[in-house]
Image (cartoon, rainbow, N blue to C red):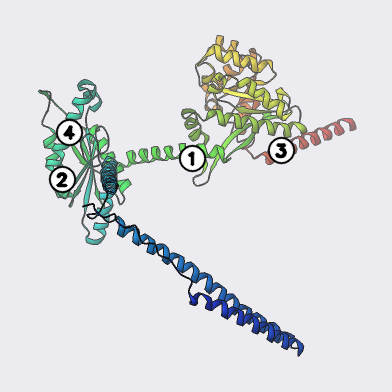
Amino acid sequence: MASPIPDGPKQTTSAPSRRGLVPYVWLVIVLVAQTALATFLMLENEWGTASLVSLGLGAVAGGLILLRVFESRLAQVQRKLETILSEIEYARPNTRTHASDANVFELIDCIAEHTSSLISVTVEREKQLLTAALKDPVTGLGNRSVLSHRIGVAIRTHAESAERFCVAIVEIGRFKEIAEMLGTDQINDAVNQIARRLRRELRKEDTVVRLGDERFALLVSGDREIAEQVLNRIVEAAKLPLTISGESVDIKVRLGAAMYPEDANSETNLLLHAQITAERSSRLRTASVFFEAKRDAKLTTHLNDSRESLSLQSDLTRAIAERQLFLVYQPKLDLKTGLFTGVEALIRWQHPKKGLVSPEQFIPMAEENGLMQSITEWVLTEGAGFAKTLCSRRPEMCVSVNIAAQDIERPGFSDFANRVIRDQGILPSQLCLEVTESGLFEDTDSVIATLSALSKSGLKLSIDDFGTGYSTLKQLQLLPVNEMKIDRTFVGGLASSDKNQALVKSMIDMGTRMGLRVVAEGVESFREMQFLQKLGCDEVQGFFISRPLPAQETLSFIELRHALYDSSREDAQTLASQH
């Protein structure tokens, strides 16, 4: 007997309803009433009332229209829901289901199975990522993130119960040497053995994590006496040799610890002080020590300085972009005429938080981190811009700027310097480039080639900090320079030291014989200036003449000096003519 063909989903039809006509009937009644009333009121000259009545009845008519629209939409939704329910009922498997229907349900089951599998894989992957983020891949111990969390919990617990704890750093001695000897796989085996020993000697409430190749960190709950007992057990366990590939390998560990809250009151300082004591432990060749503020003060200062230096390094890049750097200018005085011959541009850094940062502090950072090119180009451009302003008033003057030795060796530097001169519209002789003596002889052939190109273009060149390097007379003769600046270390104490006088005299004589202008830096007293004048020095600069000044103050100071000079010379000529 043939199975009956299943009936399809019942189609619901909606015959026109008398209720659907009701809103339209009322709409017609409202509109007729509106027209009649409005007409009557207008005939009675009640225009305001007519307007209000029309507006009110219009609102009623609009409401009726909206009611009809919503009723129609709700009816459509109702019909669609009835259709969907009918189709679902029809699709339910029963004895009348066709083979094609079975295939559909198999496909649905397959999709559901794959979706479930995908969810499982995703969850497992999430677990793996979380594990990788929190665990050391070699030992399975927690990492710095885990330690940070545990220290945070311990600090909060201390606030509630005053429970103390200790943070310790454990370092494996001669790790790099052992790693090179054993190889990657075997050193990982050694690290795992050490990790197991640490876990074995700690209590359940304590924590051990791996911070790096040879460094572990411990968090030990309890007072100092308890911490010492736990750490001593670790030191004793570490003395036992490791067995690597059947061979015995001796290791040594150094351990430094700091207590909370007496030695430090934050995670950062706990780890810092523990690291300091670990270094002292290594230096004293003792296995375990606790932090001591007095003994470790010097090392603490050194590490804090190192951290501040790292902070400044990152800030320096921003300083260049945000124009936190600026120039000040120190005048140079001619000892024969008493007039200024020019100025030296000196860089400064106004840090937004740390205030004025010394160039002795940030220039070495810039040289180490590849920032000198940007700084030199900025200094050269700014200095040339000031030279344009200064030389528009005093064309005979010159602005000196300091450049690094690595800039001289950089291809295209001479082209850049000449482009700056052209862009600023100054004469090449109105700009002088100062290079330290030690930097001039790092790569003599390259340096001489660049300096020769700069000299041929008309720029002045100066050897800065002369006497601090190891240049020979023969090397000096090869350099196309115009000026030699004696370092301030030889000028200080010149008035009271015969040896200094003899040394400075020899430098001045050598520079004069080579046809160079000789400038002495760091002049801080009248006596020093007098001695330099007697020894034949051409120019001086230093705090006795003027401290470094901002641009506008420099211009005013130079103008005042020259105005006084011109005035005194006129007075002298007047007196001479009267006699």
Assess disc 2: are there few (<14), some (14-19) or many (≥20) residues with their C-alpha within 10 Å of its C-alpha. Answer: some
* Labels 3 & 1 near each other (Cβ < 8 A): no
Q: Using the image, determine if residue 141 lies above or below residue 519.
A: below
Mark-to-mark CA distance, 2 and 1: 41 Å
Secondary structure category for the residue under label 2? helix
- Where residue 202 appears, as percent x and y from the top left, is 14, 44
Q: Around disc 4, counting alpha carbons within 10 Å, would you say few (fewer than 14), some (14 to 19), or many (20 or more)?
A: some
Is 380 or 122 nearer to us in this picture? 122
User: Quadrant of the rendered structure where residue 552 is?
Assistant: top right
- Quarter location, residue 392: top right
Res 228 label = 2
| Residue 429 relative to residue 490: left or right | right
- Check disc 1 and report the residue beneath it: 315
Q: Position of residue 324 (x, y in %)?
A: 57, 41
Residue on which the image places disc 4: 192
Q: Which residue is mark 3?
A: 555
- Labels 2, 4: front one: 4
> Looking at the picture, which amino acid does disc 3 mark?
Leu
Q: CA distance from mark 3 to mark 2?
A: 68 Å
Q: Secondary structure at mark 1?
A: helix
Pick whichever of labels 3 and 1 is earlier in the sequence. Answer: 1
- Disc on the earlier residue, 2 or 4: 4
The answer to whether the residue labelled 3 contacts the one labelled 2, judged by CB atoms less than 8 Å apart, is no
User: Label 4 sits on what residue type?
Assistant: Asn
Tell me which numbered mark, 4 or 1, is placed earlier along the sequence: 4
Q: Are marks 2 and 1 in contact (CB under 8 Å)?
A: no
* Residue 177 locus on image (x, y percent): 23, 23
